[in-house]
Amino acid sequence: MMTAQASPVRPSLRRRLISIHRWLSLCAAVFWLLQALTGILITFHWEISDASISGQHHPTDLAAIERRIDRISETDGGRINEIWTTAGLPDRYNIYYDDRAGGGRSVRILGDGSVIDRPRDDETRIMGFLVGFHHDLFGVWGSWIVSISGLLLCSNLLLGLCAAWPKRGTWRIALTPARRGPVAARLYSWHRAVGLWAVVPALVIAATGTMLKFESGMAGLVGADDVSLPANPPSGDPIGFAAAAGAALAAIPGSSLTQVAWPEDDDATYRVRVRAPGEIRRAYGGSIVLIDSNNGSVRGIYPIAEAEPARGFMSALFPIHTGEAGGTIGRMLLVAVGLWLITMIVAGALLWWKRRRPRKAAPGRIAA
């Protein structure tokens, strides 16, 4: 008597998705855990860094800042490149310049030009370390690792959402974790329910962070052209920082200064970034004003509120990823999403470990 050989049963699509989701999560769990932890710790790093240096405050005085810039050029013989707001406590700025040897240097000042910090080349601070680790692991190869990890995280969140998607009429059960039953079943119920609660905002934060790692490519993909004008030939002595920054602030009433980039050798144009009223980009602003350094006239005004959709989209990536688009509440929600991701990683690892442990055979059970 011959018996037909049973054909193997193919796993369902849902089973395959769950398997892929599980193994991708296990492979990248440690790195995602570190990224979530550092992301939480640096959410308020601008304010923490400023507060740790000095508690003083002086309103912004453009003429006083220009005098400080002139002294830096005289004493260090350096070429000033740009000045940025620290984005932490109000009326604080970082001046970036090259010294006589061509090395990059920076000075942190108050609004009246007083120097409060001169970082050394060999100095490593905890917040700087955490930011560097979270952004690019301190190098080009690290940047690629972070980028690939971001893509993997986005795809895995989507896989997890597909695998956990409840059937019609079972949403209430899926969103309510089980409190009874075997440990593995309860752990899976919690993992699924908590995942469904916050997977969408987590996916938004992961996706915007990943797109920022491919910023140039994304800008080209969506057609977001950088703000620029034809080169403006130099003629005579250029105007100073105060005149350029003052003209830019006057061009967009009510704005605050966030960055000034000095003219290039072949282009007599100050590029000034300001934060206009109502912008979601609270730290650095997204509105740009181009100032002719030959005579102080305004060459172009580009408020982010009036930008084409592609440039507006690219400008919104950073404030959405950092939570600053929602102010303090938005940044607290970012912390909550980071804690959610840590919870999901730990719960997923425990669930995997629990299922891998061999089950004890029931008393009296005989293996054939």
Image: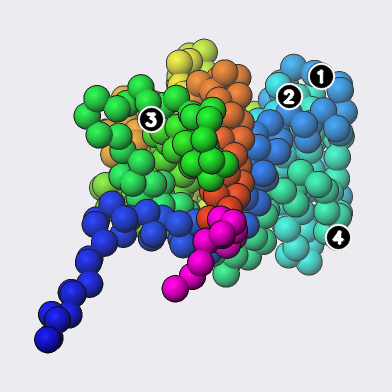
Can residue 47 be seen in the rendering of this structure? yes
Residue hosting label 4:
122
Q: Are marks 3 and 4 in contact (CB under 8 Å)?
A: no
Q: Identify the magenta region.
A: 356-368
Q: Earlier in the sequence, mark 3 or mark 4?
A: 4
Task: Give how far across and how far down residue 25 sits, in percent.
Answer: 49, 56
Assign a secondary structure to mark 3: helix
Residue hosting label 1:
57
Disc 3 residue type? Ala
Residue 344, above or below 178: below
- Badge 4 density bin: few <14, some 14–19, many ≥20, Cα 10 Å: few
Identify which residue is drawn at 39% across, 46% down. Answer: 160
Residue 331, above or below 5: above
Disc 1 residue type? His
Residue 260's quadrant in the figure?
A: top right
Assign a secondary structure to mark 2: loop
Disc 4 residue type? Asp
Residue hosting label 2:
89
State the CA–CA distance, disc 3 to disc 4: 53 Å
Residue 98's quadrant in the figure?
A: bottom right
Q: Are marks 3 and 2 in contact (CB under 8 Å)?
A: no
Q: Are marks 1 and 2 in contact (CB under 8 Å)?
A: yes
Identify which residue is drawn at 85% across, 45% down. Answer: 118
Q: Nearer the viewer, residue 121 or 212?
A: 212
Task: Give how far across and how far down residue 297 sits, in percent.
Answer: 45, 30
Q: Nearer the viewer, residue 122 or 176?
A: 176
Assign a secondary structure to mark 4: loop
State the CA–CA distance, disc 3 to disc 2: 44 Å
Q: Earlier in the sequence, mark 4 or mark 1?
A: 1
